[in-house]
Image (cartoon, rainbow, N blue to C red):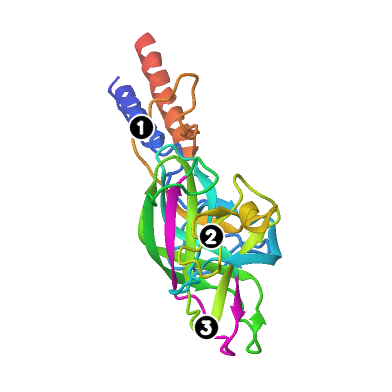
Amino acid sequence: MKAAKILTIIGVFVLALGAGTVSEAAGAKTADLNLRDGSSAGNLDLAGDRAVLYSQVASVATGYSWYADDTGDSYACEGADDFSVTWAEGWLVNQVHLVGIYYEWDGDPTDTASGAHINFYAGGSDHPTAAAVCSSEATVNTDMIPAPPATGGPGSHGDIVFDLNTPCNLPMGDYWLGMGVIIDYGGYAVDFRWTLQTSIVGNEPTWINPPGGWGAGTDWMTFTELFGSNSMDYSFEILGDEITGPTPTPPPGGGGGEPIPTMNAYGIFAMVGLLLGVAILVFIRRR
């Protein structure tokens, strides 16, 4: 009798242990960076490489790009594109990956981005309509954009990853990612252009040039408003962690954004142990 009780207690304990590990931790790394050529960046040693939370680099149009650089003068501009946070407890955004290209103008191909101003705006419209809900300066983690030719003109499209100095906590919902890549445009040195996609995902891109140096865009403009027509989007990825927290009460009809727990090997082992203990207890009591 005592042995059966001990086996039963052990089975319950192991079952509890297994139940705590039936689903993968929300903050675990789930995907590698996706490069513009369709390959994975799993072989890259990115410092603090996080999970890909949102990806929009599946159809990069390497012949098309548009300005998105904070040059510190009248040509300073910002590009923005929309996305949705789909995890119920929200995302903690640590990194942003862009596909982009450098244009060289002063014969020095070593001029590159030194950082970025990153803004997240509330969604729900065809362009940002209010102040950013979260902003952060960002530093360059990895710059894989090929250097432009010293003779001037465009280089080749490549990938660049920025680390947010202050990670942004974004609750579930719709947002705009605003990017102004910091670069020295003084004396027409070099400019950065954000590479486009061949199709629109969600809303089309928007652009703003508050100082007015470009002669347009002192307020947010969609690409259709800017160019007369548009069928393209920006190329980017958002990296970070899904925030863990108490399981929310599902709305009527189900849902709630939580993954469905699955029984892993520990859970199966625990269940077998529990059933074995109960079977022995029943057998001994019947004798």
Question: Which residue matches tag 1?
Answer: 16
Q: Which residue is mark 2?
A: 217
Question: Residue at label 3?
Answer: 111
The magenta-colored residue range is: 101-122
In the rendering, at what x and y percent does residue 199 appear? 69, 51
- Sooner in the amino-acid sequence: mark 2 or mark 3: 3
Q: Nearer the viewer, mark 1 or mark 2?
A: 2
Mark found first going from the N terminus, 1 or 2: 1
Q: Nearer the viewer, residue 208 or 69?
A: 208
Residue located at (50% from left, 19% from top):
253
Query: Answer yes or no: do the residues labelled 1 and 2 have beta carbons within 8 Å?
Result: no
Among the 4 quarters of the image, the one containing residue 160:
bottom right
Residue type beneath disc 1: Ala
Q: Residue 252 versus residue 268: which sits nearer the camera?
A: 252
Instruction: Give the farthest residue toward the left.
Output: 2
Q: Residues within 10 Å of mark 1 (few under 14, many from 20)?
A: some
Split into 4 quadrants, where in the image is the N terminus?
A: top left
Q: Is residue 20 above or below residue 212?
A: above
On the question of residue 287 being in view, the answer is no
Per the model, the C-alpha gap separating discs 1 and 3 is 57 Å
Q: How many marks?
A: 3
